[in-house]
Amino acid sequence: MPKGRARSIRAGAFLAAALLSSCAPPGSLDSPFTSEFAELAVPDHNAAIVSLPRGAASPRPLIVAAHGAGDRAEWHCELWRRIVGDRAFVLCPQGRRTDERVPHADASYFYPHHFALDKEVQAAVRALGERYGELVDAKEALYTGFSQGAIHGSQVIVLHPDVFPRAALVEGGNGFFNEWSPYAARRFAKGGGKRVLFGCGSPACVRTAEKCAGYLRKTGVEARVVHAEGAGHSYGPEMEDELRRNFEWLVAGDPRWALE
């Protein structure tokens, strides 16, 4: 994410709202939720950020959104909230601080490898269920990742295709680091994988992503590559628009996402 956009988001009211929500003890935010965001304590990890489905009185599906290197969870929870609103919980794991000397409010974060990301995601999903109980429908969650979150995330979803049968991999996980192979695609499909959306901001990304999409299609997994022309390596407005336009395709066939 460009530094200017990062600063503008940080200057907004997000952190104040999240911190106010985090002051409440676990389980005290009864439905309907009145806040958009909350901090979520995750054992042995930094606190995650959650976008809450305000007004939910019945279970809501789950999106896990992983950021890029030198990034922050808040920005991705904000982006996916703009796309899905109150239709789902959006769980954004924070990762590890790039420099422990920098205070949290000014810090950036990363995921060192896919094993660390996998462990943190599992811990965060458990913590979410413990805090919000039956309102969280975590089965067949949607995984989304940007850059490093997509590179490592492509391996996480292959490890757990039953947990994450659908994924949006943006500017990462598209084959530049050989994330996909015929074997990985078969494993994803055999375990329950259903749909993968590759989001690209450059022609080079499109070329590698189309090859990976081909591996997946041969196994019966539906795959789509979208090109946000001019976006480059960013999660900016052009990419956000492409994700919004293709979101209903990504969740098609899952009745929990049906628009009323």
Image (cartoon, helix red, strand yellow):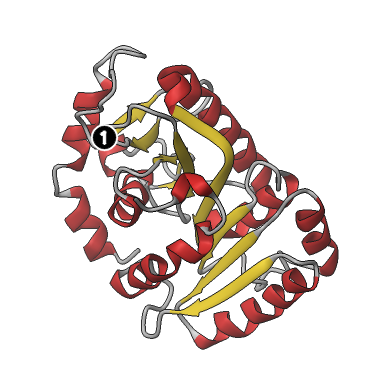
Side of 130 relative to 3 (left or right): right
Residue at 62% x, 85% y is 207
Q: Is residue 46 above or below residue 7?
A: above
Residue at 67% x, 72% y is 175
What is the x, y in percent for residue 64?
49, 44
Q: Amino acid at mark 1?
A: Arg
What is the x, y in percent for residue 167?
57, 57
Which element carries disc 1, helix, strand or loop? loop
Q: Which image quadrant for residue 141? A: top right
Residue 148 visible (yes or no): no
What is the x, y in percent for residue 180?
74, 66
Side of 121 relative to 3 (left or right): right
Category of crowding for the residue at label 1, using alpha-carbon neighbours closer than 10 angstroms: few (below 14), some (14–19), many (at least 20): some
Label total for image? 1
Residue at 77% x, 57% y is 189
Side of 51 relative to 181 (left or right): left
Q: Which residue is mark 1?
A: 54
Residue at 83% x, 68% y is 182
Residue 253 visible (yes or no): yes
What is the x, y in percent for residue 176?
65, 73
Report the front residue among 137 and 230. 137
